[in-house]
Every structure is written in C-alpha cells, then in structure tokens.
Amino acid sequence: MTTHLITDAIGNTPLVRLDRIFPQKHISVYAKLEYMNPSLSIKDRIVRYILDNAEASGELKPGSTIVENTSGNTGAAIAMIAAARGYKAILTMPDKVAEEKRSVLRALGAQVVICPTSAAPDSPDHYVSRARAIAASIPGSFMINQYDNKKNAEAHFKTTGPEIWDQLGASIDYFVASGSTGGTISGVGRYLKMQKPAIKVVMPDPYGSIYYSYFKTGKVHEEDIGTYQVEGIGEDHLAKCMDFSIVDEMYQFNDDNAFDAALRASRHEGLFVGTSAGANLWGCMKLAETLTEPATIVTVLPDSGLKYLSKFKKYIDQGFMAPARDGVLDLKRAAV
Ligand SMILES: Cc1ncc(COP(=O)(O)O)c(C=O)c1O
C-alpha cells in the first residue's frame, strides 16, 4: 500500500486465528491486530475520527492545542496526528503508565504531565481533572474527551465493527473486549449485534475497577476502586461512552491473568501484545472453558507489548509468572 498521509494507514488491520493457545477443536478464536495501527494501538481510529470531525466543524482551528487525559495510547495517537497536522499536544497521564509510553509521547513532540495514580477521581490532581484545568486555561484548545465523547464509540461502529464483520461475517458468535472509555466494546458490539442479534458480548474487567459490580448491581461501589498494573482498561468512574446494554456478561480478572495470557500469546502465537490484549485473551480462554458447542469468538489486541517492556521484565523478574515451557500449555487443552 502506498499512501501520502499517516492517517490513511490507520485501520484495516489483519485478523488472525489463534490455534495454538486455543487448540480446542470446536472453538475458533480470532484476534484483530490493532497494534498494527501506525502509533501501535487501536486508539488511532478514534483520534483520527474525532479530529477529522472537529476540523470539519471548525471546533479545532489550525495550529491550536489538543489536550487530553490518557493512559498513553490515545496520547500517542494524538501526538502522532498533531505532529503530522501541525497542532500542539499536552497530555496528562497517571504515574503508573509504563515509562516507554511517556517517552514515545515526548519523542513525538507532545508535552506530558504526570499525575498520581492514587489521586481520587474528584481530586484536582487526578489526571482527568488536570487535563480539564489545562484545557480551560488555553484559549481555543480542543479536548478529545474520549470518555464522554459519543464519537469515540461511533469511530468503532464505523470502522472496527464493519472490518470485523467483513473479515468473519455471520460465523461470529461472541465478541470479547475489556474497556475503559467503553468505545471499543460499545461501538463494535453494537455494530455486530445489528448484523446478527444472537452475537453475545463479553467484557473482562480488572479487580479494582467499578465496572463489574456496576454491571451486576446497577450501582457504583466506591469500595471496589483499587490499583492494578494492567493499563488502559477498567475504570474508577463511569464513562458516558460505555454502553452497558451492549454487554451480555462480564468476568473479573487480576494482573496475573492478563500478564500470563499476554506472554502466552507472545511465546506460542508470536504475538507480542500489551496487557489489555492479555486480558482480552484471558477472557476468551475463560469463555471457551464454558462452551460445549462449536463457537467462533473474536477479540481485539489493542496494543503492542513494546509499550510495556519494563513492566513485563519486572513482572517476570518478580517471579509472578513461570517461564514459558516448550510443548503443551498449562490449560485443559488438546496437545499443541
Ligand atoms: C491498551 C488499551 N487497551 C484497551 C483500551 C480500552 O479501550 P476503550 O477505551 O475503547 O474501552 C484502552 C483505552 O485506553 C487501552 O489504552
């Protein structure tokens, strides 16, 4: 493919079948390689879509400043497109974000503001509040506002969902995706269910996030809020973009589950993916264990393991994960 603009290289990512970590004969699992977008994550899709719309409506003027709170991927997409289109970018991040992700934003010319992960959602030090305060102080600045901007889910409804449907069609039975803003699961889930209402949508959610118990009880339980090492998924507040009516089931997972699944994908499928991809793959494994009839599951691998090299190293060094073994995996599966 030859293209003149970096934004034209966003989307149309490959979908691969994972036979080695899902060797059950009656289950087919497909993963969409979203880490093959130009800034190495699924967030390129929403940022391009929101900026294109803001430019068209005149909300975003040439040379102005884009401000956003981000766990890194939305920031990388903003920094990339801002550099290519001549905008300034100021990005706030929680301090748990891997060093590699901060460095990428700086390399792309963005200004990075690090905020304490432990800050309460209503604290001025919380990375979302900081972004809002910065934006309010810069005349003509533009916020992507990924948590509450309906165009986030719309971007997935218009691109990721149709691509998955074109790639797999009516064979799809389940879509599995964890969420933060909820844009991916809400947009893709809605599109797929519109094509085939029988499709079920399953969401893995980390311990420490409010989403699981909100889904089960319809109430936010502040006591659920806790810290975890997996990045970019789970939430300490309700995002307006997250449409719970699309979700059929949620599973809770811990850091070990997600890191372990990510490293399995890396060592047995050659897919070096990030920790939320690990969570999604763990969700597919958990779902597969419950299925006795033939089924096709599709998921997304939102970003690359390259963004978490220091975290993976620390995780393995601390002995959280057994080193990879050759041959048969530690799961109730046929021989690999
Ligand atoms: C690495 C990663 N995975 C998954 C997600 C979740 O996607 P969404 O915000 O569409 O729910 C994010 C969002 O920040 C992310 O950064």
Image (cartoon, grey):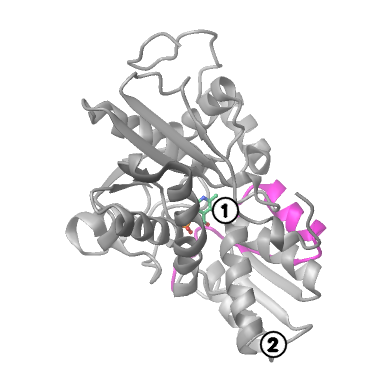
| Residue at mark 2 | 138
Q: Is residue 279 above or below residue 69?
A: above
Q: Is residue 104 magenta?
A: yes
Q: Is mark 2 within 8 Å of ligand 1?
A: no
Q: Which residues are magenta?
A: 93-122
Q: Position of residue 196 (x, y in %)?
A: 29, 52
Q: What residue lies at 64% left-to-right and 47% top-to-bottom?
A: 98
Secondary structure of the residue carrying tag 1 is: loop
Q: Earlier in the sequence, mark 1 or mark 2?
A: 1
Q: Position of residue 101 (x, y in %)?
A: 68, 51
Q: Is residue 25 left or right of residue 133?
A: left
Q: Is mark 1 within 8 Å of ligand 1?
A: yes
Q: Is residue 323 above or below residue 259?
A: above
Does residue 120 appear in the picture of this structure? no
Q: Is residue 100 left or right of residue 165?
A: right
Q: Given the image, on which type of amino acid does mark 1 rest?
A: Ile
Q: Quadrant of residue 243?
A: bottom left
